[in-house]
Amino acid sequence: MRPLFHGADVPEEVIRADDAAESRVPVRAASEVTTPGYVRRYAEAVDVPVFLGFGQVDVTPDAHAEPACYRASIDVTLVVIEGSAHCHNFAGRRQELWNRLASWGDTISSRRTVPVDDRKGDAE
């Protein structure tokens, strides 16, 4: 499973440390979230902006199909990090993901979230 979780640029000592930590992941949780279609029923209810960050190789069979699961969200952003696998934070290009997430967060937080009818002065 290593190639699914770690790209070729991840040092062996980092992979060993991650392998040791993985033993703490509840088996049931791991099996549920990796079961095809399991998350879809929950994703369909998400009605806030969504940022989806995937590695070029990841646990989803098709990262580009994932945004369609979030039908109630009016903002779904997909980023696929080239050369990365599922464990993005260990990848050589992790800063690319972090920078994209930070700029997305800035964009989302700067939007007006007040409904048009509640804005004072807009109708005048």
Image (tube, rainbow, N blue to C red):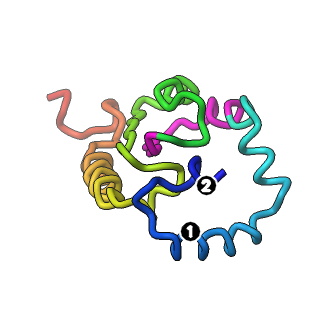
Q: Secondary structure at mark 2?
A: helix
Does residue 66 show up? yes
Q: Position of residue 26 (x, y in %)?
A: 81, 62
Which percent across, then down, holds residue 60?
Answer: 59, 36
Magenta stretch? 40-56
Residue closest to the far left = 124
Q: Which residue is mark 2?
A: 2
Magenta stretch contains residue 106:
no
In the foreground, 64 or 108? 64
Q: Which residue does the image show at 76% across and 52% down from the upper left?
A: 30
Q: Residue at x 67, y 31 (%)?
A: 40
Q: Quadrant of residue 42?
A: top right
Front residue (pair 16, 100): 16
Where residue 7 sits: x, y (%)?
Answer: 46, 53
Q: Quadrant of the C terminus?
A: top left
Marks 2 and 1 in Cβ contact (< 8 Å): yes
Residue beneath the point at 34% across and 53% down: 97
Q: CA distance from mark 2 to mark 1?
A: 8 Å
Q: Is residue 48 magenta?
A: yes
Residue 120 is left or right of residue 13, and the answer is left
Q: Which residue is nearer to you in this view: 59 or 29?
A: 59
- Residue 93 image offset from top left, x and y in percent: 32, 56
Quarter of the view holding residue 8? bottom left
In the image, which disc is placed on residue 15? 1
**Residue depicted at x 34% and y 41%:** 114
Q: Is residue 84 rendered to the left or right of residue 102?
A: right
Q: Would you say 86 lies left or right of 122 here?
A: right
What amino acid is at disc 1? Ile
Please, what secondary structure does the residue beneath circle 1 have?
helix
The amino acid on which the numbered mark 2 sits, given as a three-letter code, is Arg
